[in-house]
Each structure stands twice: as structure tokens, then as C-alpha cells.
Amino acid sequence: MTSTTTPASTAAAHPARWRGSARGTWAGSVITHAVLIAGAVVMVFPFVWQVLTAFKTQAEAVAVPVQVFPSRWEWAVFTEIFDVLPFAEQLRTSAIVALVRTVGQVLLCSLAAYAFARLHFRGRELLFALFLSVLMVPGQLLILPQYELMVSFGLLNTIPALILPGLFSAFGTFLLRQFFLTIPAELEEAALIDGASRLRIYWSVMLPLVRPALAALAVITMMNSWNDLLWPLVVNTDPNVMPISAGLTTLQGQFQTNYPALMAGALLASLPMLLVFLVLQRQFVQGIALTGSKG
Amino acid sequence: MAVPTTASTPATPAPARRRRSIRSGGRAGLIGYLFIAPVGIGLLVLYIYPAVATFALSFTDWGPFGGNTFNGFANYVAVFRNDLFWRSLGNTLLYMSIGLFVIPIAIVIATLLNKPGLRGVGVYRTLYFIPFVTLPVASGMVWKWLYNGDYGLINAFLGNFGISGTYWVANPATALMAIGIVQVWSQIGYYLVIFIAGIKAIPQTYLEAAELDGAGPLRRFFTVVLPLLSPSIFFCSVINVIATLQIFDLIYVMSQSSSANPAFNSAQSIVTLFYQMAFVENNKGNATALAFLLMLLIAALTAVQFRLQKKWVFYD
């Protein structure tokens, strides 16, 4: 867990490494940039084309030969989507689900993780092993009984159905436990002697110390929640309570070959998460570096 | 620090007793159970019970109104006799093999990005990372549009070189490959982050020593960087295999939106077949058996990789 603090962006901080190969450095870096730029074009171009298509008319979108830019930037299709589908509700549903799942999971998992790392109680190792066993099971295996549970709770086509399974995470508990283990016990013992309760120690001493791990878990949870498709398709078939991921698939059914509408919908649906990423980039990278270092 | 607010705090905090309660059982024990209870109960009800239930249900016939009757291995036999199962198994293994290409691609990019003094590393990393955070349904739709046989940009581009393209996701011969490429594209950012960290962790002295011995950049890459990166490669390969064996979203969006798609079965994975069986055909008995077989497949391929790692993974 040492490589977790500053993941990258320190590349420039290696002043004179590989000094000997100074010859041809200039040509070398031109080639490097050429390859990296070509790669970046492949990574990003689909989005550029998506945006360009979204603002075209249908006739321009299917013009042969290809018309690159729209002759007028058309907004009409964006409003059309909102008229045909409850797109605004779906975006809101996705946002609520992502928010509740993220906050809930971080709170609940950190509570359990703290107990597993720091408190001693009978059967702790056994319970922890049980938690870990959940990690081995692929999600599809659980879906049918989970669906039946939602039916018996009367939660089909409700927002809680979208939230519930994702509120609890064995992985989150495991990840945070590893972090709590790295914190010196003396800090906590000092607080105990001062008479602080366990809940208080967890909240005001331990949680602030693992803040980077909490942030990393939070962004990864948020992304998974926003992008999840299979579970929403199963539990919420009513377009009014679908998240945007499932909503987009119905958009595909509705607009068939209306390419500007499809691209506009896809753009609106992916934009919120992209913005979150651009703002919280460091946490995303850290989240991956963390999950990557557990092996 | 302030007086604890919990009602259950003892009135006489004798230091010795406190010390003991840190170690074992007692009040700290009770608090421990309380702390793990929310996640514990959630996992028990929504994960552990369903896992056991799926296993049990895979040996039963699902009655229309809940009455399940034991039918031995009938569901498994039915799955094994189903041609679509073998087809989707083969397809899934193909997706897995295509998916693994993400590893060499990410290593090459990570190596380039680690070039000393390179400018714009942050910008590149952001750009390469964007597909990973994009909603897969949305990526699938955009790529489906690029792959479009009549108006797609890819065919227009190929047309410049006199190559006539095809209906990439509707042609049974190309659908799987077309979707597999999108899968690789969407995952590069994730593995890139892991490999950048992995390469950074390689001690400079090793590279300098190799250079003093006259090793060129390529030689250094193959004899120093790659072996030292092998634990990361191993980790990525395990994670990637587990993920692509469960591929669903892209296939669902790009080829399963209409059962009239001629490439419907050629692109089907185990999970899309599972979805089809469980929620479209309502054949839940067979679906649970299929889900259990998928878990066995994942476990087996993970175990094989762990076994093989002794042969090639180098721990410093």
C-alpha cells in the first residue's frame, strides 16, 4: 500500500534518469508523442463524432459522402428526447441512486472495516472469512434470488430496489480494513484512555485518517452505480423509475435509426459521470491504484 | 475529549478493565458486532442467501407460483444439451482472449508515458482514461453508430482506401470481434493506471546497471522492465479474465437490442444468454444452472492462472 499517495504526475520529477541516452532524445520524444497522440485520437474520437452527430439533422448524419460538421448546430433533438422519454426523471434517479449508494456504502463499510481491523470479538476471523467469500461470487449468480427478494419486499420498480444490493459491499469492507490496519494503535489507545467511546473514536479519530481511501472507494462506487445495467434492467422495467443506463436502452428502441437523437441521448447520459471524473480525477486514479495494489 | 454519549458506557472506567476490553470479548466485543451488523446483515440477506439459493435452485424445477420441485441434474443436462450454451461458452472465451490484448497495449502506452521528461503526461492520462469512466451503454451506442454498415464513419474511412466495409455488428463473422475491440478500448485507461504505477516502482539502479552493461532501450524493456512488471501483469490478467468472462453491457447494447439481428447468437456471451433465459424466456431453472457453471468457469480459469504464475511471475 505504499504506492498509493501520489499515483502519477510525478513523471517530470525524475530529472536525469537514463542520462546516457541523451543522443537522439529529441527524435525519440517526437516519435513518442506521435504514437501517444495517435492513441489518444483513437480513445477520444468516438466522443467527438458523437457530439458532431448529436447536433446534425438526420439528413446530415446519414449523408454520403460523410459530412463532418453540422451546417447549423441543431438543439431540437435534445428537447425531443425529453418529450418522448422521461429522461429527466431517469437522470435524477441515477443521481439519487449513485449518491445514496456511495454515501451508504462508505459509511457502512467503514464501520464494519473499523471493527474488523481494531475491535476484538469472538468469531471475528470467521465472520471476516465469510465476508471475503462474497468476493468470490460473480454478480449474475445472485441476481435471480435477489430479484425474488425484491418481489417479496414489494420493491419492484422502486428506487430502493436499485439502491439496496449496492449499499453493502464486501469489497469496500475489505479495502477499508486494510487501511485501518495501517494506522498505529497508539492513536486510538490515547483516545480510549481519554474516555472516548468506540463510535466517537471511529468517527473523529479513525475516519479522518483514512480519508484518501474513503474518497477512492466513493468515486469507484459512484461510477459503478452510474454505469450499472443488468440489475436495473431486471428490477425496474417502468421507464419512470429506470436509471439512465437502462433508460438509454429504451431510447435505442424508440429512436431506432434517428442517429442524432441516439447520440444526444448517449451524450447526456454519460456527461454527468465524465464531469465528476474531470473534477475528481486524482481520486479516480487513486481508487484504481488502490484496487490494483491489493493483489 | 468529551464524555462518551453512548448509553452503555460503564460508570466506573477502571483502567485495568478497559485494557482488557480492548483485547477480548466484553463490551468492545458487543460493539464489534454492532459495527459489523449493518453490512453483515445486508451481505447475509442480499448476497450469501442468494448464492446458496441459486445453488439449491439449480437442482429444482421452478414452479410458476413458487412451488419448486427437486429434479436432480436435469437443469445442468438441459444446459449441456443446449447448443446455445456451447456457442456462448466459445464466444465468451473468445471475448476473454480478445480482452487480454488490453494488457500489452496498456504496457506499451505506460512505458511511453514513463519516458523521462515527457511533457503532457497528465493530459494523455486523462484522455486515455475517459472511455473507462464513460457509461458502457453510451459507448456501445456510439460505437454501433461508428460501425454502421451504411453511414458509419469506419466504412467511410475504409472507403477512402477502396476497402468496402461490412455491417460490422450485424455480420455474424465480425460482430464478436467488433464488440471485443470496444471492450479493449474501454478498459485501456484502467490498466494504464496500474502499469504506470508498476513501472514507477522499478528501482532506477536496475535500469542504470543494465544501461552501463550496454543494453539498449528495447533490451532494457524486455530484460528488466517486463520481468519486474510481471506481478502487475499477473494481477491485471486475473482481473481482466474475471471481468470479460462476465461481459454483458456492450453486447446487450450493440447486438441484442433486436432478436432479428443475424449476429444475435454469434455475439452472445454466457451472461447475455443467462439474461435471455432468466428474464426473457423465463426458464429460471436452466438459468440458475448456467449461472453456477459460469462461477465454476471463473474459479477454474483463476485457479489455472494462479498455478501458472510460478512459472513466469517474478517477485523481487
Image (tube, rainbow, N blue to C red):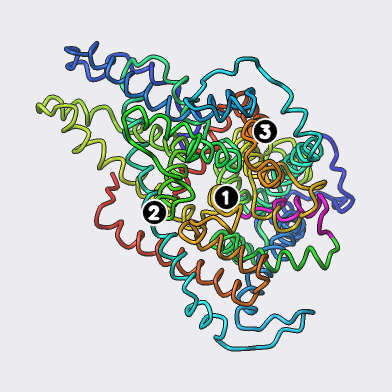
Q: Residues within 10 Å of mark 2 (few under 14, many from 20)?
A: some
Q: Residues within 10 Å of mark 1 (few under 14, many from 20)?
A: many
The numbered disc on residue B249 is 1
Q: Secondary structure at mark 2?
A: loop
Callout 2 amino acid: Ala
Q: Which residues are magenta?
A: A155-171
| Nearest-to-viewer mark from 3 and 1 | 3
State which quarter of the image contains the N terminus of chain B. top right
Residue furthest left as drawn: B214
Distance of label 1 from label 2 (alpha carbons):
20 Å
Q: Residues within 10 Å of mark 3 (few under 14, many from 20)?
A: many
- Residue A167 inside the magenta-drawn segment: yes
Residue annotated with mark 3:
A261
Q: Identify the residue at horizontal 71%, vertical 58% (top origin).
A: A234
**Left or right position of A231 against B117:** right
Residue B72 visible from this viewpoint: yes
**Left or right position of B31 against A62:** right
Residue annotated with mark 2:
B173
Instruction: Using the image, determine if residue A106 lies above or below residue B200.
Output: below
The earlier-in-sequence mark between 1 and 2 is 2
- Residue B309 inside the magenta-drawn segment: no
Q: Position of residue A25 (x, y in %)?
A: 22, 13
State which quarter of the image contains the C terminus of chain B. top left
Residue B186 visible from this viewpoint: no
Q: Position of residue A73 (x, y in %)?
A: 66, 17
Instruction: Using the image, determine if residue B207 lies above or below residue B284.
Output: above
